[in-house]
Image (cartoon, rainbow, N blue to C red):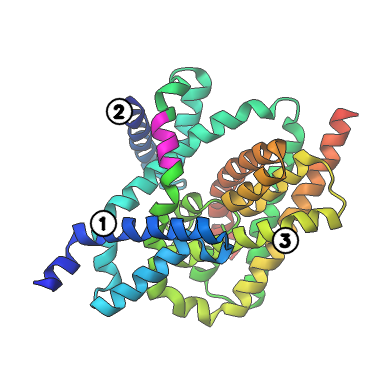
Amino acid sequence: MVDTIFHSELFLLTLTIGIYLLSGYIFRKSKLMLLHPVLLTALCLILFLNIAGIDYPHYKESVALLDFALGMSVVALGYLMYEQVERLKGASLPVVCATLAGCVVGIGLVVAIALMFGMEREVITSIAPKSVTVPIAIAVSEPLGGSVAVTSVVVFCTGVLGSICGPKLLDLFRVTDPMAKGFALGAASHGIGTARAIELGAVEGAMSGLAMALTGFGTAVLLPIVEKYLY
Amino acid sequence: MKGLFVILACWLAGNYLSMLIDGYLSGNIIGMLLLFTLLCCGVVKGETVRGAAKFLLGTMALFFVPFGVGLMESYGVIMDNIAAIVIATVVSTFGVIVTVGWVFQLLNSKNNG
């Protein structure tokens, strides 16, 4: 009886959203990056599923609604791009060149280092899109045979790393232009970097959001080519 | 509701286009570009999709949770490659920040001067 309830789709979906809301509350109270709501929710759920003896495929099927909503969110990113595009005026050359440089360096360094370590193809594909926002990274790595769980973890860590070290690194290399700073943070560490850039200033925040959208698009176009010919 | 319809229609059209190009780009990414294009051309007004888009973007973090839970299946893969993954992530994240910041600043200053 209890088992039937625990295993039901409705229960698992409600539990997921409930734990997520609770985690968000804890995150806002503690302001600790490591207690990021997604991370905390996932860990709690893994614990629960293990105790209740529910396997991952069953859980994934039960919360298919969230998967569907993520697909819609990727499309909704088009609206975000549209909101940002007005800020592009007068800076199209640096924007285009910096986006290209970011995509090439981002994918190139990961693939080069991964090959040096003799990593398997599936793992390389999973971590190659690590600088772009999770929904795009997943949309890129999944069809190419990457593991979405590995992708999400690496993308998340990249975001936290960039937002913590990014501003110091930019100072060290004497990048003082606020537009350049914001763009660099968004290009390297997507949404989490953008949240940090907004703290630096409005210009930084807007440029970071723009960089996040453009790098995501650039990576989506570039990675399949790299995957096919380079490794 | 209209906004949701536009987003779903873009996704659907994106899926068809994705099949035409052999899945080179996934349907939702093409849908994102379609929505962006429609908004820029003024075919769809910004306010039509704003409500639905803001809701989806604001709740997006929740939609990642199932992938995070996927860790229970794939943490072995990460642990097997932990050194390489950490080095690749750190080097390339720092590389991107410095390169992008530097390129952007160089070209932007030329632009303004």
* Neighbourhood count class around disc 3 (C-alpha, 10 Å): few under 14, some 14–19, many 20 upward: some
At 75% across and 30% down in the image, what residue appears? Answer: A91
The residue indicated by pointer 3 is A165
Query: Which residue is at the front of the view, A133 or B24?
Result: A133
The residue indicated by pointer 1 is A14
Q: Is residue B112 left or right of residue A26?
A: right
Q: Are marks 2 and 1 on the same chain?
A: no
| Label pair 3/1, CB-CB below 8 angstroms | no
- Using the numbered discs, state the Cα–Cα distance from disc 2 to disc 3 in whole angstroms: 42 Å
**Which residue appears farthest toward the left when viewing the image?**
A1
Spot occupied by residue A69 in the image (x, y as percentages of width and height) = 34, 46
Res A167 seen here: yes
**Which residue appears farthest toward the top when viewing the image?**
B42
Q: Return the mark for residue A178.
A: none
Q: Is label 2 in a helix, a strand or a loop? A: loop
Q: Is label 1 in a helix, a strand or a loop? A: helix
- Using the numbered discs, state the Cα–Cα distance from disc 3 to disc 1 in whole angstroms: 36 Å
**Which residue appears farthest toward the front when viewing the image?**
A29
Q: Chain of mark 2?
A: B
The residue indicated by pointer 2 is B1
Query: Which residue is at the front of the view, A152 or A39?
Result: A39
Residue A13 included in the magenta stretch of the image = no
Q: Chain of mark 1?
A: A
The N terminus of chain A - image quarter: bottom left
Residue B55 included in the magenta stretch of the image = yes
- Using the numbered discs, state the Cα–Cα distance from disc 2 to disc 1 in whole angstroms: 24 Å
Magenta part of the chain? B51-57
Say how many tags the image has. Answer: 3
